[in-house]
Amino acid sequence: MLKVIIFIAPPGAGKGTQAELIAKKFDLEHVETSKLGEDQINNPELVKTDSEVAEAKRRYDSGDLFPPPWTAKLVIGKARESASAGRGMVFSGSPRTLYEAENEIPEFEKLYGRENIKIFYITLSEEESIRRNTSRRICEKNRHPIPGFPQYRDLVTCPEDGSLIITRSLDKPEIIKERYRVFLEETKPVLDYLKNNGYDVITIEGEQPIGMVQEDILKNF
């Protein structure tokens, strides 16, 4: 499937989990924008020598979004690479700002065709976002999300790649609250931009169990 699937959602809504499931089902590449950035800001040499990376790290550590021009550059580079390899993509984290949307969406249209772009908005309340994120875990190697349900509570290694399961330092209540505020301020306007440009943004209720969210998403394929 040569498509671009975009998941837009507040923190903790499960966009990474759903993107991973869709990527496996349709043989698409899952591009987690935050991981693209984290691969750079976690490189001490890059932080020392590249002012853009240093600024991205400063913002990330405070709970803010990566600088939009820097993020858009990473995403567009990745999209060109995947398109040239003949692979479709699933995004869980971009576009997060109007700048990113205005620069990335036209590039996706050129690479994949407007008719092959599908956009989902997964809703989640602030209260549930904080609850989920403070109990959220990911794997150390590839950031596979580990759902916060009882059957996963005793897992210590990732069932996907065998790496250790960790809790992110950013998943603290005060930081999640700030990230939710940033989502409302910076990312919600992206939905208006997309709708105003003729895209059908499909809304999914994110407070349901993972399987039900997945079922609702698959109804649109």
Image (spheres, grey):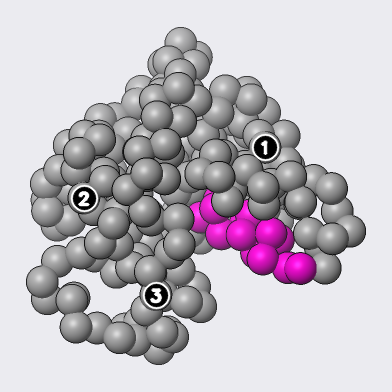
Measured along the vertical axis of the image, is residue 151 above or below residue 60? below
Q: What residue type is disc 3 on?
A: Ile
Q: What residue type is disc 2 on?
A: Arg
Q: Which residues are magenta?
A: 32-44
Residue 27: horizontal and vertical position, in percent?
A: 43, 64
For the C terminus, which image quadrant?
A: top left
Query: Farthest residue toward the right?
Result: 49
Q: Nearer the viewer, residue 102 or 45?
A: 45
Residue 61: horizontal and vertical position, in percent?
A: 58, 51
| Crowd tier of the residue under label 3, counting other residues whose Cα lies within 10 Å: few below 14, some 14–19, many 20 or above | some
Residue that label 3 marks: 166
Q: Nearer the viewer, residue 38 or 106?
A: 38
Distance Cα–Cα, label 2 vs label 1 = 27 Å
Residue 92: horizontal and vertical position, in percent?
A: 44, 48
Residue ID at (51%, 55%): 32
| SS assignment for the magenta stretch, majority | helix
- Please tell me the numbered disc located at residue 131: 2
